Amino acid sequence: MRVLHVTHQYRPAIGGSELHITNLSEELARRGHRVTVFTSRARDYRTWRSELPKVENMDGVLIHRYRSLVRGALTWRILDYGYRNYRRTQSRCYEPLVFLGNGPVCPGLFWALLRKAANHDLVHINNLHYAHAATAYLVAKWQGLPLVITPHIHMEQPMTYDIDYMWTVLRGADHVVADTRSERQFLIGAGLDHQRTTTAGVGIHIDAFPSLDQQACRQELGLPIDAFVLLFLGRKTEYKGLDLVLEAFSALLPHHPQLHLVAVGPETTHSRALWSRYDGLPHLISLDRVPDEKRLLALNACDCLVMPSSGEAFGIVYLEAWAVGKPVIGACTRAVSSLVADGQDGYLVPSGSASQLADRIVRLLEDPALGPQMGKSGQKKLRNRYTVPKIVDIVEGIYLRVLRRNGHRTKQEPRAGKANRQARSIDRREAR
Amino acid sequence: MRVSLINLNLVAEDAIGQCIINQTHFFHCRGDAVRIYVLHPPRNVPADIADVARVVTLGDLISRQQEHFILSDLYIYHYPGRHALMESIRGIDRGVVIFYYHNVTPPNLWGSDADREVLMRGIEGKALVHYADLCITDSPFNKRDLAEETGYAPDRIYVLPLAVPLDQFTPAGKDPELVRRFNLEGQQVLSFVGRMAGNKRIDLLVEALARIKEKVPNTKLLLVGDDQGSPAYRQVVASARARAQELGIDKDVIWTGSQYPVPPYLRLADVYVTASLHEGFGVPLIEAMACGVPVVASRAGAMPWVVGEAGLLFEPGQSEDLAAQVQMVLQDASLRQTLVERGLERVQDFGLVQHEAGLAEIVDSAMIYALPRVSLEPMTETQDQPAARQTQTARSETMLTFLATEIAGQSDIALRDYQVRSRAPLAGPLIVWARRNMTSHLREPYLDPMIEKQVDINRQVAEWMRRAAILLSDSAQRQIELESQVKALEVQVEAIAGRLDEAGARKEQ
């Protein structure tokens, strides 16, 4: 199969949906499909500044990157103006402003799609919210190409998806891949065909998250061995819930002096304001953007991941905690409650409730066996459902279903030689 | 259309083998061309099934040597566990693919390490369901199990119970020959049919027998099924025998090994018991109920659903509870009678007719979903059997009626509620005015009449199709009447010819 992935950013840019499309592309390439990625040259969606090379081949995936218009203060104002007025009037004339404000605006990407998209069996758009989705949708429809989209909808933030042109993209796609069961239900409720909507989810490579010695990790991070360590892991923006964690933490600290909090993730103006508010709070370590190794150290050093984020499309970070056998506490949003089973592999607390959050932390603190047990149960769930190969099985199945529905024959028989060799080896194994 | 059925093997006595045979007959009757692709040569199957079965390897399927396979419109992958041919599901780029899930026993219940790897692969391989357009499975328990483990959408999983040949499994007296052979005269018999795998908990049956014998001394346990086919079975049998010896009841446990046909063995039973911890369906339960035998089963897997109100359930793994339930049936004749009656009523839901009707509905809806790409024409000459022809006619009629309703529903293509609107700030009303008034010269004389004409034609087409469906069913009816008349006439002609011959012979004399 020849697959074209169109995404706003790709590795080495960081983020949940970036990681998802990278894992997906690489695993599909490993399975013998020819995967091309069209994306922007940016590594930060706040500026869309073109930094990355134009063409690259990473782990069997051919990546074409295109220059985009830089998002400056003016663009953000345009986006804000567009959003506000669109919400108020529902008039379509503000949609172009949303489109331009979101970016990445890449004329080169549009031109390349027009020229090259038809060489592929199928176009897969990753992430609905940015401008590349509408661009790729237009081209795929003009050229009659089968189209799959993984929208990564943040259901709690209607502003980001409830735009008419985005619904046109969703309704026009041949198949929509939801991250969670609740997202699928939401899409079906909004009028999408249940046959054309499938839950896949996001997977991680378990091998990338080995369990390390907790004591050594704590020493490395300068934490006491016998502490009870809470970990916040993610971009410190408003909706991720760092303020709630700090509130619960500062309330618990006088009664539970063994508590420590490690907050890892890129700082923002929001987080800087929080630090000044909680200035001088002991037992608190904050790290800015860190390399993967340090991230792994933090995951292994902690006793519990605390991320009461109110706007997750999926929540890869919970999977990462499970991978090293740690329990998680998340907010009871639609996406996260599809992933975390309350009381089994972690806890869910009502959005915005610091007191409930503190209550769950105390439960884990007081019963030392409970946390590891929940972590283990999460780890089992992760192995069963959310590894990269499992997710790719689902997506590969969707591609085939879409091709069958569209009466397309794959333009090039996938890896006839390799497939035959694999089949022969399976046959030999069976014969034995 | 062309249909490919894929499975590991094809054994007539096996529940899945029987299911494949039923499906092959079903598609044959519809006039479809069927091929069965298996890894191992078929065993004990009727000649017409053996004709369409092909023994292949995965290489044969994906190297596109099997013309029927690569051109099929419908693929049904039976999943009794992961087998090599399953891998071909990853490459099907045409038609409709159905994953037929028959459940896999969890390795921790298997009771032996012998087949652990195979079972683990079976559990892993469930994820192949994602390559299918829809999934059929035998029970709501299987549906839940698959949806939970793989995340496959429950609204794409259809429950279709396996069919039991109710004409073979009927109530009748105990076979005196078998009673004599197993020395069951004057004995109360508990029986179990199935392979002696760990999840069936034979040891629990033995323990319960010891308890039952305290109250009902003349009780025996008859175990019918494969007890030597795998090291795991042998292990289970050895430990159950040891347990029986320990309890001093080894003479009361009878192992018959695999026996066919099964009905006479089921009829020997006064109660059918199963202590299985995991069943995706449980065919023997239905067979026992159909033979007029009350059943006692554990409250596990699909069994509570299969048994319904028609049998007694006990807590899985608890021999005291099992013994208590069995005693109740043995000692209370009216309860026994109620259970038998309810059982006979319950099994009516698991007949071949229901199975075929359910399958037809699922296949037709799947085919209509993929309609533009799939040829629905019969591929083989309809067999010259009135039943086959009738099914074919009934199917065409359903199809016509369905299409007629679809077309009738969509016939009104005019957008009658449409109102010209514009949300443009300031210029909006002007745009609305312009669009309303500057297009009327096109709309009123040309577009509106054209659309109305098309609506009329659509309605007529729907009406014609409805009438055609009625005519079709009338003519089929008339044909059957004429055929019976022709038959009657033939009989008369033969009688007259016979009489003439006799008269001729007499004349010669």
Image (spheres, grey):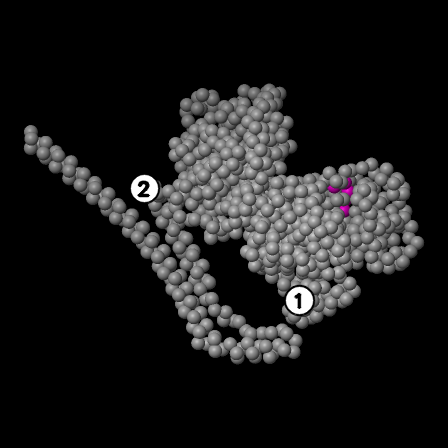
Q: Which residues are magenta?
A: A323-328
Amino acid of disc 2? Asp
Location of mark 1 (residue): A95
Q: Is B171 placed left or right of A174 in the picture?
A: left
Amino acid of disc 1? Glu
Tags 1 and 2 touching, CB below 8 Å: no
Q: CA distance from mark 1 to mark 2?
A: 65 Å
The residue sitting at 58% across, 48% down in the picture is A399
The residue sitting at 44% across, 34% down in the picture is B53
The residue sitting at 91% across, 50% down in the picture is A282
Q: Secondary structure at mark 1?
A: helix
Q: Is residue A261 magenta?
A: no
**Label placed on residue B384:** 2
Q: Quadrant of the C terminus of chain B?
A: top left
Q: Quadrant of the N terminus of chain B?
A: top left
The picture places residue A377, in percent across and down from the top left corner, at 72, 41
Query: What predominant SS class does the magenta segment belong to?
Result: loop
**Crowding at mark 1 (Cα within 10 Å: few <14, some 14-19, many 20+):** many
The picture places residue B167, in percent across and down from the top left corner, at 40, 37
Mark 1 or mark 2, which is nearer to you? 1
Nearest the eye: A207 or B187: A207
Give the quarter of the image for residue B500: top left
The residue sitting at 35% across, 59% down in the picture is B467
Q: Chain of mark 1?
A: A
Q: Chain of mark 2?
A: B
Say if residue A399 shows up in the picture.
yes
Say if residue A202 shows up in the picture.
no
**Crowding at mark 2 (Cα within 10 Å: few <14, some 14-19, many 20+):** few
Q: Secondary structure at mark 2?
A: loop
Nearest the eye: B286 or A301: A301
